[in-house]
């Protein structure tokens, strides 16, 4: 683990855990059960397409379980397991049902057997995880040889802290400003009024190289445009609709 990652883990992890617990209801109300068009129109279809008829699926950072529930409706599967460190998420996940096993665990130490899954999924999770290397080592440990890791992130380049759309009326220019992309950083963002969420920013190369070091080889990459449903709810993004918000990666365990 790098010095930067070690610092982030030791100093930031307790704050992050408290914030996720405090804001669990915000996530549940705003991003699940069809409430969020990016999930409905983009994230869930990408994951469903890549997962296919996989039989033993683990989701890291499952939240209240909407991804696993959606997968359970597409194919009959032998095993669906979701882990999450936030109790408030797991309580609702179990209430919402499905033939899914839920375990309270963080991503760096998952209490499951080696080579137990053919697919591991992590969606919008690793930008909140302190110990990147250990979490990816756990993903690789839990995957059988030839198994796949489906990995979705807020796009590390375009969602860098202090990035955003600039409408410069003085010079008549419009562009997407990029923040300090190469600088590893942790921050707490006010994503809505009085809702504070912890983020860890890393360059894309950190994710790719850590995955390679864990015997995960990149097989496919998507940078989709924001879906129409998102643009309809956030028309200020219309001019920036050719800038991807999401990065989807698929790795194979060697």
Image (tube, grey):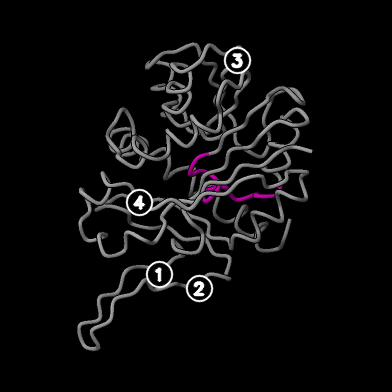
Q: Which residue is mark 2?
A: 180
Q: Earlier in the sequence, mark 3 or mark 4?
A: 3
CB within 8 Å, label 4 to label 2: no
CB within 8 Å, label 1 to label 3: no
Q: Which residue is mark 3?
A: 79
**What's the CA distance linking mark 1 and mark 3?**
41 Å
Q: Is residue 182 magenta?
A: no
Asked which secondary structure carries label 3, the reply is strand
Q: Residue at x 43, y 50 (%)?
A: 224
Instruction: Give neighbour class at mark 1: few <14, some 14-19, many 20+ (Cα, 10 Å).
Output: few
Q: Is residue 154 left or right of residue 113?
A: left
The mark found on residue 226 in the picture is 4
Q: Earlier in the sequence, mark 1 or mark 3?
A: 3
**What's the CA distance linking mark 1 and mark 2?**
8 Å
Mark 1 vs mark 3: in front: 3
Q: Residue at x 48, y 33 (%)?
A: 86
Q: Is residue 129 magenta?
A: yes
Residue at the far bottom in the pictured view: 171
Q: Earlier in the sequence, mark 2 or mark 3?
A: 3
CB within 8 Å, label 1 to label 4: no
Q: Which residues are magenta?
A: 123-133
Name above or below for residue 214 compared with residue 82.
below
**What's the CA distance linking mark 1 and mark 4?**
19 Å
Q: Which residue is mark 1?
A: 162
Instruction: Give neighbour class at mark 4: few <14, some 14-19, many 20+ (Cα, 10 Å).
Output: many
Q: Position of residue 191 (x, y in %)?
A: 32, 54
Asked which secondary structure carries label 1, the reply is loop
């Amino acid at each position: 683990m790098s010095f930067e990652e070690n610092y982030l883990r030791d100093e930031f992890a307790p704050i992050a855990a408290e914030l996720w617990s405090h804001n669990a209801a915000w996530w549940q109300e705003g991003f699940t059960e069809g409430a969020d068009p990016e999930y409905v129109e983009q994230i869930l279809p990408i994951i469903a397409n890549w997962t296919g008829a996989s039989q033993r699926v683990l989701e890291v950072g499952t939240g209240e379980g909407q991804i696993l529930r959606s997968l359970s409706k597409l194919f009959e599967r032998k095993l669906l397991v979701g882990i999450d460190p936030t109790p408030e998420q797991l309580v609702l996940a179990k209430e919402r049902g499905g033939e899914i096993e839920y375990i309270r665990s963080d991503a760096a130490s998952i209490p499951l057997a080696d080579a137990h899954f053919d697919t591991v999924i992590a969606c919008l999770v690793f930008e909140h995880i302190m110990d990147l290397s250990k979490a990816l080592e756990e993903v690789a440990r839990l995957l059988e040889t030839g198994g796949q890791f489906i990995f979705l992130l807020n796009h590390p380049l375009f969602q860098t802290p202090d990035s955003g759309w600039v409408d410069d009326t003085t010079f008549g220019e419009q562009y997407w400003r990029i923040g300090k992309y190469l600088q590893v950083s942790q921050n707490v963002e006010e994503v809505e009024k009085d809702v504070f969420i912890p983020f860890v920013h890393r360059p894309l190369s950190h994710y790719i190289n850590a995955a390679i070091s864990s015997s995960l080889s990149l097989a496919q990459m998507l940078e989709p445009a924001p879906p129409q449903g998102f643009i309809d709810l956030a028309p200020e993004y219309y001019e920036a609709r050719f800038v991807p918000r999401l990065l989807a990666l698929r790795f194979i365990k060697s």
